[in-house]
Image (cartoon, rainbow, N blue to C red):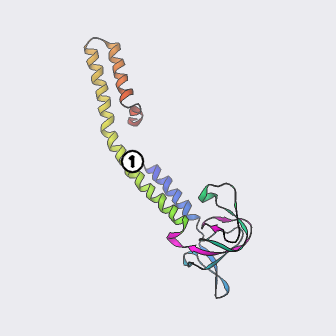
């Protein structure tokens, strides 16, 4: 369980690392660098080649190619032109462009993905606990029943049949019981 949580936490950290710390926005007619969390919906954000897109938005000026693989799994970069939607956390590969911020903070696609991963992490821990509780009683019961059938058939004087019954109970009742118990 701890290994799963460590992997999930590492995945959440990697997703959080996709967010850039700063962004360049147009305020009062000039380009200003601000912390990315301070971007407001509707603001024009400038993204240069090699930079991460700081928030979700629509391209209002310029053309580029964006690497969305860390979020979408798409291996090929995607061309973006005026009117195209861009996702915060993706990597601008070629041209400079400007976008109008449509989502900020917890409303961005990246923030929603992070939230879903965290929720999945919490729910899988509950499912794991339930599986552990069921296994705690089920496996010993099946093994006990298998031994009872072994003893019963052996007492009847038929050892080969007793061994066959023992193995049959284990395999039919739960083929993965021994793996779970191990």
x, y (%) of residue 72?
60, 57
For the residue pair 45 and 10, the one nearer the viewer reads as: 45
Snapshot quadrant of residue 180: top left
Which quadrant holds residue 89? bottom right
In the picture, measured across the screen, residue 116 lies left or right of residue 132, that is right
Residue 152, placed above or below residue 130? above
Residue 52, visible in the rendered structure: no
Q: Is residue 133 positioned above or below 79 on the image?
A: above
Using the image as rendered, state which of residue 64 and residue 158 is in the foreground: 64
Q: Residue at x 63, y 69 (%)?
A: 53
Q: In the rendered image of this protein, does residue 83 appear above or below residue 165?
A: below
Answer with left or right where residue 31 lies relative to residue 38.
right
Question: Of helix, strand and loop, which one carries label 1?
Answer: helix
Residue 27 percent location from the top left of the image: 63, 85
The residue at 49%/55% (across/down) is 8
Q: Nearer the viewer, residue 9 or 120?
A: 120
Q: If the image is split into quadrants, where does the C terminus sit?
A: top left
Mark 1 sits on what residue? 128
The magenta stretch is 83-107
Confirm whether residue 35 shows in the render: yes
For label 1, the crowd category at 10 Å Cα-Cα, with few meaning under 14, some 14 to 19 and many 20 or more, is: few
């Amino acid at each position: 369980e701890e290994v799963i949580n460590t992997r999930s936490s590492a995945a959440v950290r990697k997703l959080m690392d996709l967010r850039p710390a700063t962004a360049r926005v147009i305020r009062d007619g000039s380009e200003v660098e601000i912390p990315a969390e301070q971007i407001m919906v509707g603001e024009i954000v400038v993204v240069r080649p090699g930079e991460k897109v700081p928030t979700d938005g629509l391209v209002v000026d310029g053309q580029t190619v964006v690497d969305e693989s860390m979020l979408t799994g798409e291996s090929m970069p995607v061309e973006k032109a005026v009117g195209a939607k861009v996702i915060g956390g993706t990597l601008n590969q070629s041209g400079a462009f400007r976008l109008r911020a449509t989502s900020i903070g917890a409303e961005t696609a990246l923030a929603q993905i992070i939230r879903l991963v965290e929720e999945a992490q919490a729910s899988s821990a509950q499912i794991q606990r339930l599986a552990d509780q069921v296994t705690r009683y089920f496996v010993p019961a099946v093994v006990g029943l298998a031994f009872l059938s072994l003893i019963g058939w052996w007492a009847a004087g038929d050892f080969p049949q007793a061994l066959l019954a023992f193995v049959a109970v284990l395999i039919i009742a739960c083929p993965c019981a021994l793996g779970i118990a191990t």
